[in-house]
Image: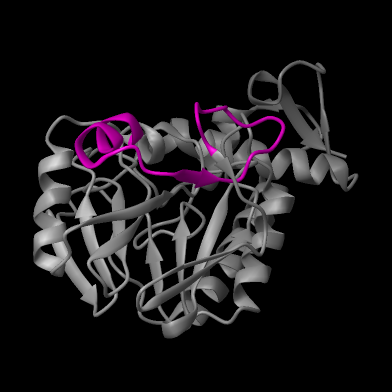
């Protein structure tokens, strides 16, 4: 997402308006997409950005652009800071709104959160959202199906540009791949991602994501030898198509693949230390 720009406020459908989280970065692209959903005077807000001071003003402009007067409630995709960091500011500016997310062991806890679960349905005027448990990028990750559009708010599981990092802390590649397959079965038309532009063909993007992960796994297996090597060296061999500035993030995804391969008996660790710091070889 290097160099990608995006308007602070965009209308992507009659039910979906985007307020940019104003937190651009190497991995967040132009920033976190937060979404106003519905057609009535009070909208559901999906995610709250990172907590940048200018975000509430952008959100207010998005509400005006959408023709809405306020917020009904807040839904969160997962507890990474670029999605929940603005929660307190939103509640301070727009009232003590209910904020809901999945609550699971191993995910950060947030104060005064209403717990929702897989399959929960949240309604507002003009929109019906259904929570879909999609762990892998994070243990508490939820996507939200927008039933009226056969669309999905994908959080960080699918991005508008590029692919998702599977972090060592809280990530699990096996679960992530299962989540992609679950989304493919929904089936999504449009995908509204947490970062980057709208994806017009959700089916094609999900198939692309699954094929990409298989390609990376094949490359990692080909890069493994009988002598253990450190993760950065494996990254250097595999990620020849990625700028070096992104290799530190790629190390997390490579390690996620290696942990999966270890479970399957196709890779082994040399030292038994933390996976990212260990040396790896073919099993």
The residue located at (61%, 45%) in the rendering is 102
Residue 78, horizontal then vertical, whole percent: 51, 43
Tell me: 230 left or right of 260: left
Residue 7 seen in render = no
Looking at this view, is 44 or 86 the one in front? 44
Residue 228 seen in render = yes
Tell me: 121 left or right of 7: right
The residue located at (20%, 54%) in the rendering is 19
Looking at this view, is 4 or 66 the one in front? 66
Looking at this view, is 56 or 215 the one in front? 56
Residue 259, horizontal then vertical, whole percent: 75, 38
Total label count? 0
Q: Is residue 14 above or below residue 180?
A: below
Where's the C terminus, which quadrant?
top right
Is 8 inside the magenta-drawn segment? no
Is 105 inside the magenta-drawn segment? yes
Residue 184, horizontal then vertical, whole percent: 61, 76
Residue 52, horizontal then vertical, whole percent: 20, 31
Identify the image's colour scheme: rainbow, by chain, secondary structure or one colour. one colour
The residue located at (81%, 22%) in the rendering is 270
Q: Is residue 89 above or below residue 182?
A: above
Tell me: 270 left or right of 257: right
Residue span colored magenta: 87-113
Which image quadrant is residue 213 in?
bottom right
Q: Is residue 192 above or below residue 71?
A: below
The residue located at (74%, 52%) in the rendering is 174
């Amino acid at each position: 997402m290097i160099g990608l720009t995006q308007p602070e406020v965009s209308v992507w459908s009659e039910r979906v308006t985007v307020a940019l989280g104003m937190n651009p970065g190497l991995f967040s692209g132009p920033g976190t997409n937060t979404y106003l959903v519905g057609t009535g005077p009070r909208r559901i807000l999906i995610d709250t950005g990172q907590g940048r001071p200018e975000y509430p003003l952008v959100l207010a402009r998005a509400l005006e652009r959408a023709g809405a007067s306020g917020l009904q409630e807040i839904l969160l995709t997962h507890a990474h800071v670029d999605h929940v960091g603005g929660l307190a500011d939103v509640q301070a500016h727009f009232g003590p709104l209910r904020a809901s997310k999945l609550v699971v062991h191993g995910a950060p806890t947030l104060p005064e959160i209403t717990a929702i679960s897989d399959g929960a349905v949240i309604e507002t005027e003009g929109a019906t959202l259904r929570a879909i448990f999609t762990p892998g990028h994070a243990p508490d990750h939820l996507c939200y199906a927008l039933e009226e559009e056969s669309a999905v708010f994908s959080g960080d599981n699918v991005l508008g540009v590029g692919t998702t990092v599977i972090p060592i802390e809280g990530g699990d590649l096996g679960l992530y791949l299962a989540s992609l397959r679950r989304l493919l079965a929904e089936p999504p038309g449009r995908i509204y991602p947490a970062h980057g532009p709208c994806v017009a063909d959700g089916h094609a993007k999900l198939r692309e994501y699954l094929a990409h992960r298989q390609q990376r796994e094949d490359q990692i297996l080909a890069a493994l030898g009988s002598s253990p090597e450190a993760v950065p060296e494996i990254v250097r061999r595999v990620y020849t198509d990625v700028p070096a500035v992104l290799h530190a993030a790629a190390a997390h995804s490579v390690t996620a693949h290696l942990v999966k391969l270890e479970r399957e008996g196709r890779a082994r660790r040399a030292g038994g230390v933390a996976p990212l710091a260990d040396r790896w070889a073919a099993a």
